[in-house]
Amino acid sequence: IVSEMKELYDLHGVRIFNFQDDNFFLPDRSQALQRFESLRDKLAHEGVEDIAIAIKARPDSITRESISILDDLGLFRVFLGVENASENGLANLNRRQTVEQSLNALEILNDFDVHLAFNLLMFEPDTVMDDLLINLRFIERHLDNPFNFCRAEAHAGTGLEERLKAEGMLLGDYFGLDYRLKDPQCEAFHQVVNYAFFDRNFSDFGLHYFNMQVDFTYQLLRRFYPEVLSESLRGAVKSFIKETNLDTYKCLCQVYDFIESADPSNRLELQAFAADMRAVVDGRSRHLHSQGERILNALNYAYDRRSQGSPGAWPARERAVEALQAGFASPYFGMGGPEQGAYTLRSTEASMGEADIFGLTPVPIPYHLFKSQLSRGAGR
């Protein structure tokens, strides 16, 4: 690992390393600690320094000692496997972890001020309304970190697929396995929020992913160029995360209240409510997305001026506020796509050059352009 990182570092100028492992930690805590110490010391010996690393982890793996070593290494991002805030839900998902371990991990990682994001598998076959309420309370108490929510999917070869098949609940085929929640109210809840939050949760321009992007960008600047950041800019980032999460929480509470008194067999009523909620969620997403774009512009503005000296040499706070006020973002319009007005960004080869501070283009590259560039590269 050290040899590969050194080669990327020396020959290609790589400074950000993403460990795409379901759990970066070893099962034994002492062995994990030794592994991280060895990685840190050997990288330092090879002159690989001033880097940033991103990892995934289970909550029961997180300790202050291990995170302290990873912080020395350059830890800036952790995707944490919270999955469910209900003990009943965790047991049904066979997670073999406790809610207390999730709470402990969240506290530790927030103390180290890293980019922390998680997903809630709020819906699984045996979910009941009390489980949903527990997850809502969890969201209410943890608005500081970007998150997303969805249903546990029965992927081929998983224990969930086998269980649903044995119970005669598995629908679809290997192209797309499906199922319905056993509790009719919970199934109605899932169908409503899956429709109402579809853009926010799952689209390329989804607000929950964008929420993560804003914090991700801020944390990378904090890791590499802390001198360009101001408290005003930090406050804008953290407030945006909380506002996005709070809006999702409020909308989910509206759905909960409706479903609690609704007839789950009344399809027309459910569909009408889902349509109304989608309009509400998408409308608020447009406003919040535009707000986040202005913050992202300010972060890019700060990065562009990183070579202009120390904080004392240029007015970082005033420049950040100026960028926030003069942001060029256009609003988010939902799943229509760029050709129907989402963002108003151009899907052309010219726009592909308009990358952000990490070299990422603002829109997904259309496949035909990707294929043509790949062909030209192969020809060379």
Image (tube, rainbow, N blue to C red):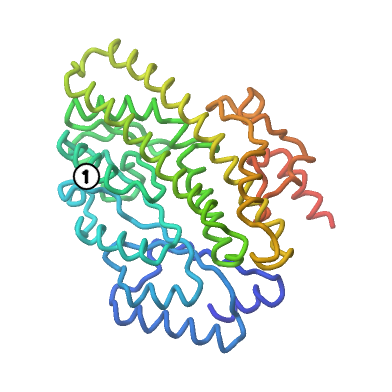
Residue found at the far bottom of this picture: 45
In the picture, measured across the screen, residue 120 lies left or right of residue 220, that is left
- The residue closer to the viewer here, 301 or 335, is 301
Q: Position of residue 112 (x, y in %)?
A: 40, 67
Graded by Cα atoms within 10 Å as few (under 14), some (14 to 19) or many (20 or more), the crowding at tag 1 reads: some
Quadrant in which the C terminus appears: bottom right
In the picture, measured across the screen, residue 354 lies left or right of residue 18, that is right
Q: Position of residue 293 (x, y in %)?
A: 59, 40
The mark tally for this picture is: 1
Which residue matches tag 1? 163
Q: Position of residue 133 (x, y in %)?
A: 19, 37
Which residue type carries mark 1? Arg
- Which residue sits at x=62%, y=50%? 320
Residue found at the far top of this picture: 268
Q: Position of residue 154 (x, y in %)?
A: 32, 42
- Which residue sits at x=74%, y=63%? 308
Query: Where, by quadrant of the figure, is residue 24 drawn?
Result: bottom left
Q: Is residue 305 above or below residue 223?
A: above
**Label 1 element class:** helix
Q: Is residue 55 above or below residue 367?
A: below
- The residue closer to the viewer here, 244 or 21, is 244
- Which residue sits at x=61%, y=51%? 299
In the picture, measured across the screen, residue 108 lies left or right of residue 45, that is left
- Which residue sits at x=43%, y=74%? 70
Query: Where, by quadrant of the figure, is residue 191 drawn?
Result: top left
Residue found at the far right of this picture: 380
In the picture, measured across the screen, residue 294 lies left or right of residue 271, that is right
